[in-house]
Amino acid sequence: MLLPYEQIGYIGAMTDFPNDVTPDRLCKADALPPSDQHARQYAAVRSAHETELLEDYVELIADLLQHQGEARSTDVAARMGVSQATVSKTVARLKSLELVSSKPYRSLFLTEKGEAMAAMSHQRHAIVLKFLRALGVSDHTARIDAEGMEHHASQETLDIMQRFSREQERGSS
Amino acid sequence: MLLPYEQIGYIGAMTDFPNDVTPDRLCKADALPPSDQHARQYAAVRSAHETELLEDYVELIADLLQHQGEARSTDVAARMGVSQATVSKTVARLKSLELVSSKPYRSLFLTEKGEAMAAMSHQRHAIVLKFLRALGVSDHTARIDAEGMEHHASQETLDIMQRFSREQERGSS
DNA sequence: CTACTATTTTAGCCAAGGTTAACTTATTAG
DNA sequence: CTAATAAGTTAACCTTGGCTAAAATAGTAG
Ligand SMILES: [Mn+2]
Ligand SMILES: [Mn+2]
Ligand SMILES: [Mn+2]
Ligand SMILES: [Mn+2]
């Protein structure tokens, strides 16, 4: 009575297969977290994705301002690997969020808010990159992985990464 | 002649400020990577984002199949923290990619391809989660961070993470 | 000043991932 | 068997982040 149901995915089949009967010790370590906690994990990822690109943009603009004295959208486009039209639209969004300021056809600046976000992002990026290198990851790979991972490291993890890098640094001197 | 230009972002101002004059030793460590390499870093992140959700779905479906014997979209929705309508649409995409199969109004199954992706994703997820815990991150935080970071860890990094966890495990026995 | 080139913006397109509301189908209770 | 409930689908909408092609503006060279 169970097998054919499972094979077609008969929805009601679970009624006579109550949860509190499943052997507990068998899948304790591997068990699924409670539904609401699980949902909050995915929600955290979605929330990180919302700000991810904004953070990368302000970080890059800050870097360009610092290293080339100026942040032109053509350079942002080249470094991001997207078209100038895409940069134009994203910059419009950054402006509406008051992270970036600029006059039409002029290059880009950060607002106070933008500077603050850039500083935080830069610091976090540096911590993750340094950590990966301290771990033994090659520079090339570390740069790639850090660019994505940075947005998903909580403060607790960042603190631990920083401590690890520091200790590793002290150990090899 | 430089300051006013910089303040308004006058594009042409850089012509008489050639790059090869900037002091090299001052910003060597902090320097921006070459433009094309930098672009490839962001491209890698974008590429990871393309498959991220698909991976989480097939992984979750596999988990539900294993732990509850059945993967119903209402459970996927609850665990993902999204509406059933969203699940319905994403599942349509998974089906068009031949990762998932199901008949209308019936629950979900993985294809061969889907099983393979789920196995890889599960393994990678486990490596990252175990690594974070081995590092000293709390279980709660490790779960959240792993859910995002897993998609941005390259094979090289995964190998190193695994070695770290194994050594750390051996050390504390 | 005029032409040319570089840069930026705009318009129109698309896919992904989310929502709510209305509808259909399946399962269960009486 | 029928009514009620649970589950799944569909339609209509939204935002984000890509793209190309065309238009507008800025900077430079003659
Ligand atoms: Mn960054
Ligand atoms: Mn990044
Ligand atoms: Mn996962
Ligand atoms: Mn994930």
Image (spheres, coloured by chain):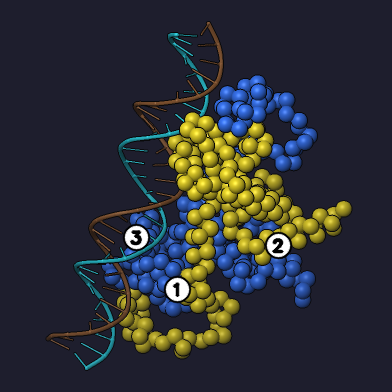
Chain colours: A yellow, B blue, C cyan, D brown
Give the label, 2 or 3, closer to the camera. 2
SS category of the residue bearing label 2: helix
Relative height, residue A163 to residue A32 (above, below) = above
The residue wearing badge 3 is B89
Q: Secondary structure at mark 1?
A: helix
Mark 1 vs mark 3, foreground winner is 3
Q: Nearer the viewer, residue B134 or B13?
A: B13
**Residue A141 can be seen in this image:** no
- Tag 2 near tag 1, CB within 8 Å: no
Query: Residue B51's spot in the image, x, y percent?
Result: 47, 54
* Pointer 2 residue: A159
| Residue B80 occupies quadrant | bottom left
Q: Quadrant of residue A171?
A: bottom right
| Percent coordinates x, y for residue B47 in the rendering | 50, 48
Q: Residue at the spot x=63%, y=37% of the render?
A: A65
Residues flagged by tags 2 and 3 on a common chain: no
Residue A14 visible in the picture: yes
In the foreground, A108 or A131: A108
Looking at the image, which residue is at 58% across and 69% down? B143
Q: What amino acid type is highlighted by mark number 1?
A: Leu
Quadrant, the N terminus of chain B: top right
Point out residue B144 in the picture as x, y percentages from the top left corner.
Answer: 57, 66
